[in-house]
Amino acid sequence: MIRGKKPCAAEASDLVRDIIRNLQKDFRVEFRSRFALNVSVAFAVITTVALSLAAGGVPFTPRVQSMLLWLIIFFSAMNGLSHIFVREEDQGTSLFLRISVSADSIFASKLIYNLVFMVLVLSVITPLFMFFMQVTVRDVAYFTGSVAGGGLSIAAATTIMAAMVAKAGGKGSLFTILSFPVLLPVLWLSILATASSFEPSGHTDYGTLVFLLAFSGFITAISFLLFRYVWQD
Amino acid sequence: MDTNHYTIVARDISKSFGRTRLLRNINVALKTGESLAVTGPNGSGKSTLLMILAGLQKPNRGSVTHASSSEVWRDEWPIHIGYTGPLVTPYEELTAVENIMFAGIGTAAGSRMDALLERFMLADHRDKKTKHYSSGMKQRLKIILSVINDPPILILDEPGTNLDADGKRILRSYLDSVRPGKIIIIATNDPGEEALCGGGIRLG
């Protein structure tokens, strides 16, 4: 006898249980290899130091500083954000994952993982960049909001892209190319918002931060609805 | 052991990949206590048929129905099916115990784990990362992963692959012991495993 859909409370409880199981597994696997985090942090450090040396102490304008910061964030993150799904395909574990936990919980746990990864990457890149590039932040709250909002949007949008690229048998380079047009509005607004927080008379438009949050929410909702079709077909 | 009765019915299953027609009008009907061996040469579609029966692939035509004498929520069907095959790979960075805890649901899985590790002779290697396992040990672990939730439907694709004589003996004795309470479907070309099953389909 097959009953229809489970009651919401029971379904939510199963979802949370599966998300926790999958997160524990992902963090354990990543902690033991530390591949993605090491590559991203190494990229960030090398690029920031190289830029600082190339500049030779000459100060950049706030707009250029903001552009450079987001370029480093974008490419550092791209090295690691796809890893969470590509690794499952490369190591042949995706079928084991698929038969062990539900598609919804896989998406939710991978999204949480990518958000944590993004927070770690941002917390390394941002102070490093400010130190080496001698950046002065005029509006700390707005700067923090723009970096957090941009980072959140990048992590949210790239999680579903990573699943698609992994299922298509693609590697990191394909992921960066496919993600770029999707992330273009996010990068554009993040650069403008971060530049405003650097400028002495910068106009801080909190609507930009609201857009970044709305973008994250919208793309997460759409991704959550579509993920099972990407994952199972 | 689950005392409910389960059935799996596949009607007119056909599957093609491009122009290659792999399966044509396959019919299967099994209930708890029954078992089926799917045999055939390499590339005849054994693995594809098992994945379809497990609900992991969709047929081009036909349908697969799983049913139970008790009420089962639609979303819960996957945990009532234990599947393993050549494409199922445990996480190499995790130990056997960590892989089993990931696949197992609830406290019952935890209590079954020790007995299964003992039975499949992996108890001494339980805390070793599976990347250090031999292919035979990995196969034993894969079988444990498929049965850790004590599923009433067991679908095993070439379960004897890479197993030594001891491993095959343990697998046969395990399958023999659980057969009365389960539906067992095995894809195999091993006459010993084939003999464990009540019926068979030959593909190709």
Image (cartoon, coloured by chain):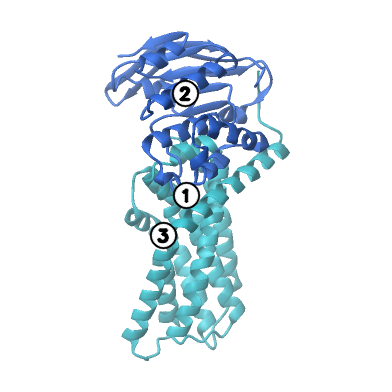
Chain colours: A cyan, B blue
* Same chain, labels 2 and 3: no
Position of B186 relative to B201 (above/below): below
- Report the residue marked by disc 1: A160
The residue shown at (40%, 80%) is: A64
Q: Tell me where residue B105 sits by quadrant.
A: top right
Q: Nearer the viewer, mark 2 or mark 1?
A: 2
The residue shown at (42%, 33%) is: B139
Quadrant into which the C terminus of chain A falls: top left
Q: Specify few, some or many for label 2: CA neighbours under 10 Å numbering under 14, 14-19, or 20 or more.
A: many
Can residue B159 be spotted in the picture? no
Q: Nearer the viewer, mark 3 or mark 1?
A: 3
Amino acid bearing label 3 = Phe
Amino acid bearing label 1 = Ile
Chain letter of disc 1 in the image: A
Q: Position of residue B34 (x, y in %)?
A: 53, 11
- Report the residue marked by disc 2: B171
Q: Left or right of A168: which side holds A94?
A: right
Cα separation between marks 2 and 1: 40 Å
Q: Secondary structure at mark 1?
A: helix
* Same chain, labels 3 and 1: yes
Q: Left or right of A130: which side holds A168?
A: left
The residue shown at (56%, 77%) is: A143
Q: Nearer the viewer, mark 2 or mark 3?
A: 2
| Residue B107 numbered tag | none
Chain letter of disc 2 in the image: B
Position of A163 relative to B74 (above/below): below
- Report the residue marked by disc 3: A35
Quadrant into which the N terminus of chain A falls: top right
